[in-house]
Image (cartoon, rainbow, N blue to C red):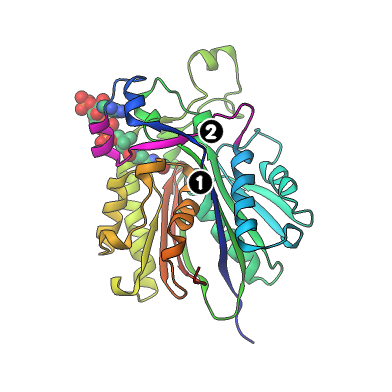
Amino acid sequence: MTKITAAITAVGKYIPEYTLTNKELETMVDTNDEWITTRTGIKERRILKEEGAGTSYMAIKAGENLLEKSGIHPEDIDMVIVATATPDMPVASTAAYTASKLGASNAFSFDLQAACSSFLYGMSVASGYIESGRYKKVLLIGADKMSSIIDYTDRATCIIFGDGAGAVLFEPNEEQLGFQDEYLRSDGIGREFLKIEAGGSILPTTEETIANKKHFVHQEGKTVFKFAVSNMADVAEKMLVRNKLTKEDIQWLVPHQANKRIIEATAKRVGLQEDKVMMNIHKYGNTTSATLPLLLADYEKELKKGDNLIFAAFGGGFTWGAIYLKWAYNS
Ligand code: UT7
């Protein structure tokens, strides 16, 4: 019997209309376009401004875009995973609402939270369900409204993050295309360096937590940078070595978009030139769970059946890892 692999068969995306440029940030905090560009590679990011709209608003739009492009009927979807660090609400599942709004009435759904590695971990989960033979269509959406947890008076974080959503569909494949290998890691030592301190079970919301701005993302950038550079490069290299791939075998590196310098360090370690590295950080910033699917959507036309892709991500927790996947279609 042929082994069933899990392939990505469709992609979709949504980015909000409002563009927050480095120039506008210069009017909000003590920063400048030159610093942001050279230190991060970011020129602008999108911000969701629609009143009362949360992460599901973007997740639904990315899902709709995928369904429209692929012609898939929503009732045929078995499972919807929303990878996100900014759910609509702390308790009610964002994925359940998203699935219902998409018309995926035969699906079950859940959220997956691993900070900036949420989508990468989601790829592992979605692929595992497909490979098991239990489900045939798994919709994985990475979506984050980072602007809802950013302090726009803190120049250390407000210049980095943006809002957006991307979606992929995983289906069984009998040509051995799709998901090939993974190396996923986590280390709780990291939670001191990148966190939202309050609003959870350790420090519930009080007037004091609000006054002290403890509901916003706090990051010790330098420390996170060091861990991100070494760990993302390590896992990407491991994917090549373990699968006996040379740099010539790789068509695309698909790296989490946190900082252009981290991406370049990862590419250098695996010996890949710039033209093989997917990049859109300049226009979206760090959209957390949405960076990887947004890259796939932006580069879809350039991807060819059989291309070898190495995904790599690093995020809060710490969480990180790499995935090796063979692209399954020409668009
Ligand atoms: O996706 C999840 C994982 N997150 C990451 O991977 C992010 C990792 N970290 C980073 O990308 C970088 O550390 C940052 C982009 C956040 C910061 O870059 P950096 O090169 O590490 O800068 P720094 O924090 O060491 O600051 C260097 C200088 C400081 O000034 P002094 O002390 O040298 O005088 C900062 O005060 O730059 C100053 N600075 C700024 N200046 C202008 C910090 N933020 C800004 C700013 N504009 N926005």
CB under 8 Å between callouts 1 and 2?
A: no
The residue at 62%/29% (across/down) is: 201
The residue that label 2 is drawn on is 48
Q: In terms of sequence position, does the residue under pointer 1 or pointer 2 come before the other?
A: 2
The three-letter code of the residue at mark 2 reads Leu
- Residues in magenta, as a range: 33-54
Say if residue 222 shows up in the picture: no
Distance in Å between CA atoms under marks 1 and 2: 15 Å
Residue 111 or residue 300, whichever sits in front: 300
Residue 125 location (% of width, % of height)? 59, 59
The residue at 52%/52% (across/down) is: 119
- The quadrant of the picture showing ligand 1 is top left
Q: Is residue 173 above or below residue 262?
A: below
Helix, strand or loop under label 1 = helix
Along the horizontal axis of the image, is 253 left or right of 69? left
The three-letter code of the residue at mark 1 reads Ser
Location of the N terminus by quadrant is bottom right
The residue at 42%/42% (across/down) is: 284
Quick one: which residue is furthest to the bottom in this view? 1
Residue 165 image-quadrant placement: top right
Residue 208 location (% of width, % of height)? 54, 12
Q: Is residue 200 above or below residue 317?
A: above
Callout 2 crowding tier (Cα within 10 Å): few <14, some 14–19, many ≥20: many
Whether residue 46 appears in magenta in the rendering, the answer is yes
Whether residue 232 appears in magenta in the rendering, the answer is no
The residue that label 1 is drawn on is 289
